[in-house]
Image (tube, grey):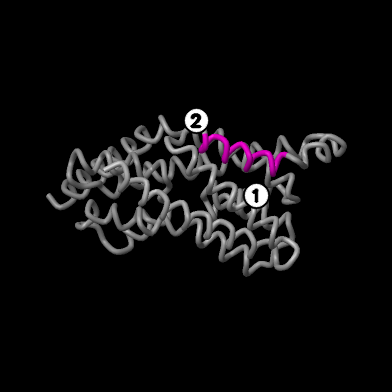
Amino acid sequence: MLMNTKTSRGNEANAEFRAGVMACLPTIPGYWSIGFAAGAIGTLAGFTTLQTALLASVLYTGSAQFLFYSLWAAGAEVASVVFSVFLVNLRYLLMSSAMSVFFREQSTAQKLISGLLLTDETFGVAVQRGSQHGHVPYSWMLGLNVAAWLNWILACVVGAWLASALPPSLMEGLSFSLVSMFIGLVLMIWFASRRKALETFSIATAVAITLATAGQMDISLVVIIAASVSATLATLGLRLFGKGEK
C-alpha cells in the first residue's frame, strides 16, 4: 500500500513537471532572441564561450548580463559591477514575495529553489497558474524554471559561439553593437510608453548627468547615479502627472 502511494505521488510529480515544461514553451522564443544577443555581446566584451555559459548559468538574467558586459568592457571595478547587478536584480525580491502566497505548503528548500530560478517570464506564467488554482505545485514550477534556464544557457552559448566564429576584422567592426543594443532597448521602451514626454525627460536627465560627471568619477558610479536620479525624478513626475489626471 505504501509503495503504491509513493508510486502514485512520483507519477503525479512527473506529470506536473512535464506540464511545467509545456507551460514554458510559449516563452522560449523570447529567451532565444534575448539570450542569443546576450551571448554575442559577451563575446564582443572579451569573454570566451565557456565564460559566457558560466555567467548565463549563475547570473541568469538578461538585463543584468547586458549591464555586466557593459560595465566590464568599460573597465569598472568588480565591486561596482556587483553592486550594479545587485540593484538591477532587486525586482526579483518583490516577485518572489508576490509568489509566496502560492507556495505556503512547500518546504523552505523548495521555495528557495523556485525563487532562485525565477525570471520575469516564468513569474508571469506562474502567477497566471496560481491565480487560477490558488497554488503552484513545486514540480510544475521546477519544470517551468528548468526549461527556461536550460534554453537561456543554450541561447547564450549559441550566440557566443557564432560571434566568436566571426573574422577578427568583422569583430572589430561590430564593437559598436554593445552600445547599439542599449540604445535599441531605450528606444523600444520609449516608443511603447504612453507618456513619452516623461520618458524623454528621464533619458535626457540621465544623459546630462553622465556627460557632466563622466570625467570626474568611476564610470560605473556615474551609471548608478544617473540611473537613480533620473528614475527618482521620473517617479515623482509620474505621481504628479497621475494626480493631475484624476
Q: Which residue is more in the foreground, 114 or 34? A: 34
Q: Which residue is more in the foreground, 149 or 234? A: 234
Q: Position of residue 80 (x, y in %)?
A: 62, 66
Mark seen at residue 94? none
Give the labeled residue for mark 2. Answer: 29
Distance, label 1 to label 2, CA atoms, is 20 Å
Q: Position of residue 242 (x, y in %)?
A: 33, 46
| Amino acid found under the numbered disc labelled 2 | Pro
| Amino acid found under the numbered disc labelled 1 | Thr
Asked if the residue at tag 2 contacts the one at tag 1, i.e. Cβ–Cβ closer than 8 Å, the answer is: no
Q: Residue drawn at (37%, 46%), measured in percent from left and top?
A: 241
In this rendering, position of residue 137 left or right of residue 122: left
Secondary structure under tag 2 reads helix
Magenta region: 177-190
Q: Position of residue 244 (x, y in %)?
A: 32, 45
Secondary structure under tag 1 reads helix
Q: Position of residue 89 (x, y in %)?
A: 48, 57
Q: Which residue is more in the foreground, 30 or 2? A: 30
Q: Residue drawn at (26%, 61%), measured in percent from left and top?
A: 107
